[in-house]
Image (spheres, rainbow, N blue to C red):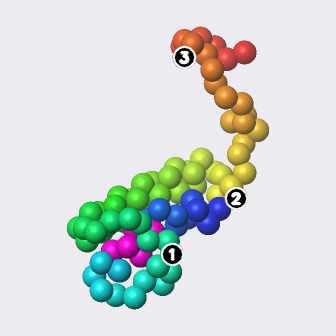
């Protein structure tokens, strides 16, 4: 799984919250532009929850290796989703 999918925004918000609490973040260069601790903690929690849901969905679909099944590689651009795929 790409690093940005695993951590990315969630990690940046966690680092931002640490900085706003007066703690030393592991990497201050990834901190978000924010001056509200409650907002930073909320964003970190939300992003972590969303990433967790995406990982669970990916795993449930059997794509744990990150490979996209051949069937899913094409974009479905039907104007009417009830039409059968060609």
Work out whether 63 lies above or below 17. above
Q: Residues within 10 Å of mark 2 (few under 14, many from 20)?
A: few
Circle 2 is placed at which residue position? 65
For discs 1 and 2, the disc positioned in front in the rendered view: 1
Say which mark, if any, is on residue 84.
Answer: none
Work out whether 29 lies above or below 70. below
Residue 30: x and y in percent read: 49, 71
Viewer-proximal residue among 86 and 41: 41
Residue 47: x and y in percent read: 40, 59
Q: Residues within 10 Å of mark 1 (few under 14, many from 20)?
A: few
The numbered mark, 3 or 2, whose residue comes first in the sequence reads 2
The numbered mark, 3 or 1, whose residue comes first in the sequence reads 1
Viewer-proximal residue among 31 and 54: 31
Q: Is residue 35 left or right of residue 28?
A: left
Mark pair 3, 1: CA separation: 44 Å
Q: Is residue 38 left or right of residue 65?
A: left
Circle 1 is placed at which residue position? 29
Q: Quadrant of residue 20?
A: bottom left
Work out whether 84 lies above or below 61. above
Mark pair 3, 2: CA separation: 29 Å
**57 in magenta:** no
Mark 1 touching mark 2, by CB under 8 A? no
**13 in magenta:** yes
Magenta stretch in the rendered image:
12-17
Q: Secondary structure at mark 3?
A: loop
Q: Secondary structure at mark 2?
A: loop
Circle 3 is placed at which residue position? 81
Q: Is residue 6 left or right of residue 68?
A: left
Q: Secondary structure at mark 1?
A: helix
The answer to whether any part of residue 46 appears in the image is: yes
């Amino acid at each position: 799984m790409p690093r940005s999918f695993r951590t990315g925004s969630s990690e940046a918000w966690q680092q931002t919250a640490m900085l706003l609490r007066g703690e030393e973040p592991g990497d201050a260069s990834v901190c978000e532009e924010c001056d509200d601790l409650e907002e930073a903690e909320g964003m970190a929690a939300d992003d972590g929850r969303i990433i967790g849901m995406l990982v669970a969905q990916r795993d449930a679909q059997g794509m744990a290796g990150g490979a996209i099944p051949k069937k899913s590689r094409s974009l479905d651009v039907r104007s009417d989703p009830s039409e059968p795929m060609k």
